[in-house]
Amino acid sequence: MTWSQPRGYRLPGTVSLPLMSMALERYAWPTWRTEAVRTLAAVADTLLQGRDDQEAVLRRLSHGQLGLEDLVVSRAQGGGILLRAAEFLDVAHVFIHRASAVPLPSTLDLRCTARFMDDPGDRDSRWIYVLLSTERSSMEIMFGGLRDVESYPVPAPADVTDDPEAAERAEIWARVLQRYKSFSPPSILAPDLHLTLDLIEALGAGDRDDGLSSYSRVTIAEVVAEVALRQGDKAPDDLRAQLVAPQTSD
């Protein structure tokens, strides 16, 4: 599924949101962090390949909405390609919340939200219904694998015609979603991006930045490794140096 077409699930009504939040902290956020590292590596690799015209690269990745002038922190610090890639993702994920913003390419969209709802027709509160919005299949696999969570997709109209079970699901989801048209349900969101701050701290640690990963911070070492994996045999020996080398303002 996608951010705009969330996947449906349900879990027993006896499961508390604090317990679900703890489960997500233990299992979901490490999965999300891995996606963040891969996405940062993809942007850094793209900027490295297009280093002669980084403005054009950023405009293309953001559908013309962001450029070098929007990367205030990395430009002020003379940050290299990796720091610019990190700030681009941070700024882009703030920017896309604007009503007029064009969505990011799905490969760069790290948003993830689980919305928890109940059915007004279920007097015994037997089930909690969840819509998971994300562009990341790994997050869907992780969430669906949590204890007590079962897939309960919202049927497409074409699925209801000759399928009684799909028709029942459609009726339940219609009631659930109708209730939340006027207010937002309780939700659990992926962490805000702070890749720029992570990498500034990692740059300060130099070659010892590996130790920062134990504190859930993104490190230079792991991003460089991911870029090298993307480049395969073409990865240069001085890849890290190329990614972190300071650059003058453009």
Image: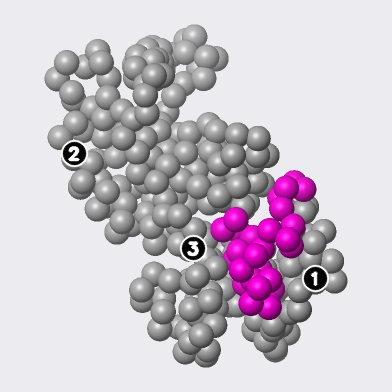
177 on left or right of 238: left
Residue mark closest to the camera, 2 vs 1: 1
**Residue on which disc 2 sits:** 15
Q: Residue at x 56, y 41 (%)?
A: 97
Q: Is residue 132 magenta?
A: no
Residue 9 visible to an observer of this rendering: no
Which stretch did the figure color magenta?
A: 62-91
Exactly how many numbered labels are in the figure? 3
**Residue on which disc 3 sits:** 194
**Residue on which disc 1 sits:** 250
Cα–Cα span, label 2 and label 1: 53 Å
* Crowd tier of the residue under label 2, counting other residues whose Cα lies within 10 Å: few below 14, some 14–19, many 20 or above: some
Cα–Cα span, label 2 and label 3: 31 Å
Majority secondary structure of magenta residues: helix
Q: Secondary structure at mark 1?
A: loop
The image quarter containing residue 123 is: top left
What's the residue type where badge 2 is placed? Val
Do labels 2 and 3 touch, CB within 8 Å?
no
